[in-house]
Amino acid sequence: MIATLDAVAALVGAANLLTDAPDMVPYQSDGRQADGAARAVARPGSTAEVSALMRLAAERGLCLVPQGARTGLTGGGLADNGATQIILSLDRLNRPPRIDAANRSADCDAGVRLSTLNAAAADDGLTFPIDLGADPSIGGMVATNTGGARFLRYGDVRRNLLGLEVVLADGKGTVAQFGHGLWKDNAGIDLKQIFAGSAGALGVVTRATVALQPLPASRVTALVGLPDDPALALDLLLQMEQCCGPLLAAFEGISGTAMRLALDHVPRVTMPFATLPPFAALIELAGMASLDDSALEDMMAHAIAPFADRVGEIAMDRRNGLWALRHAVPEGLRAAGSVIACDISVRRGDLFPLRAALTQLVASRWPALMICDFGHIGDGGLHFNMVWPDARGPIPLGLAGAVRTAIFETVVSQFGGSFSAEHGIGPRNAAHYDALVPPALRSLAGDVQALIAPYPLGRISFGGTHHPAGA
């Protein structure tokens, strides 16, 4: 291994190969705070260096684990074997984004952060509108096919991907170019889409061209309390879509328990209601210069008016105060105890029947858990999260796994939904992938992976189980 590490250092420079434990600490955890176990961290500075590393890995029997900004939630960017796995960090691939205002697109290195891209695009009145509480890298967003709170209007990364550069795990380090920043290109199979959501298992994304959208000139948000029937949110969503059309940018839902924990534990957020409801809908309208904030407020009020006798308090905001409450929910949950997180989705009409079924399931089998759900009503996504309160002591061994298994089986088997709505497939979801994805689909995905990436890369095998370390 020493000789191999020397060879890696020769490719990326000695300063960009980390082998001492203190230096590797930032690269050994992700958004779920799990500990990784890498033998080393290699930080290439160009696509050519990534290609050379991929060739070396094939020659020496190494398993490289691509890593972005470490904001992922399923463990896909962490190593699990300190003997043969090396983190391939893309953080040095971070040249300033190239903004093409006429084409309304941006060409980005994989290590560029979302915030950096949006700061550069704002100079031309543009934005990459995938809204997240974290600040991921563009390469990581492609690898997980990130969605976010404004999926309803703008879609996920896959819908906004115009071009891709990928280094393949083919033993030769082939650099493949997919697309040329074209909005319309139907000249054959759109192969770049295979890599969106692939968890870094098919190749290493080194550059991406993404579509940009005009930066909204006006924005209004409302938090609508639903004191009696949370399912009323779906009727309200349909009304907003009919009345506001493409101006509807987001339609979220937050349980009263989730709001309470955010308010109790996150000082920067404030109480929007006189009395906290059991559930609330967070609605955003966003428009261009021809519609100012006042016009959007009037439109919002007009759309909600038919529900006046069935909704509770309504808080209206032209800034980001209500979004601050929504984005503070995960932090509030973590501060209250051990979080069991489930990122699930169903057809929109099934969302509240699913929520009721899961609430009954948890209450009957694990009554000590606090249900603190929130999510994306507009796209059928739900973060059905639970908290084991710190006051009860350490979370019982095996509880989280048992709860997630029961919930995922209910989502998939009874409601035809997904056990991973937007966080992707990583080691934390691998067993559920094996259990819940039909064998024929897993076999087909495995065949595709074997064809494109015959050498080990990352932590996931779409044919079934994740790659054994170093295999």
Image (cartoon, rainbow, N blue to C red):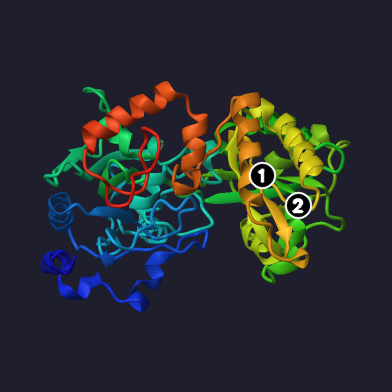
Q: Position of residue 148 (x, y in %)?
A: 52, 46
CA gap, disc 1 and disc 2: 10 Å
Which residue is nearer to you in this view: 20 or 68? 20
Side (left or right) of 421 relative to 253: left
**Residue at the (72%, 52%) spot, across then down:** 316
Per the image, label 1 sits on a secondary structure element best described as: helix
Q: Position of residue 182 (x, y in %)?
A: 26, 35
Q: Is residue 303 above or below residue 458?
A: above
**Residue at the (27%, 72%) spot, across then down:** 18
Q: Which residue is mark 1?
A: 403
Q: Quadrant of residue 283?
A: top right
Q: Residue 429 shows which numbered tag?
A: none
Q: Position of residue 230 (x, y in %)?
A: 79, 38
Q: Quadrant of residue 415?
A: top right
Q: Position of residue 22 (x, y in %)?
A: 37, 78
Q: Is residue 119 above or below residue 462?
A: below
Q: Which residue is mark 2?
A: 369
Side (left or right) of 140 relative to 318: left
Which residue is nearer to you in this view: 129 or 454? 454
Q: Residues within 10 Å of mark 2 (few under 14, many from 20)?
A: some
> Hey, what amino acid is under mark 2?
Leu
Side (left or right) of 70 relative to 347: left
Q: Residues within 10 Å of mark 1 (few under 14, many from 20)?
A: some
**Residue at the (22%, 22%) spot, across then down:** 188
Asked if marks 1 and 2 touch (Cβ < 8 Å), the reply is: yes
Per the image, label 2 sits on a secondary structure element best described as: loop
Give the mark, 1 or 2, whose residue is nearer the N terminus: 2
Which residue is nearer to you in this view: 356 or 468? 468
> Hey, what amino acid is under mark 1?
Val
Is residue 139 among the parts visible in the rendering?
A: yes
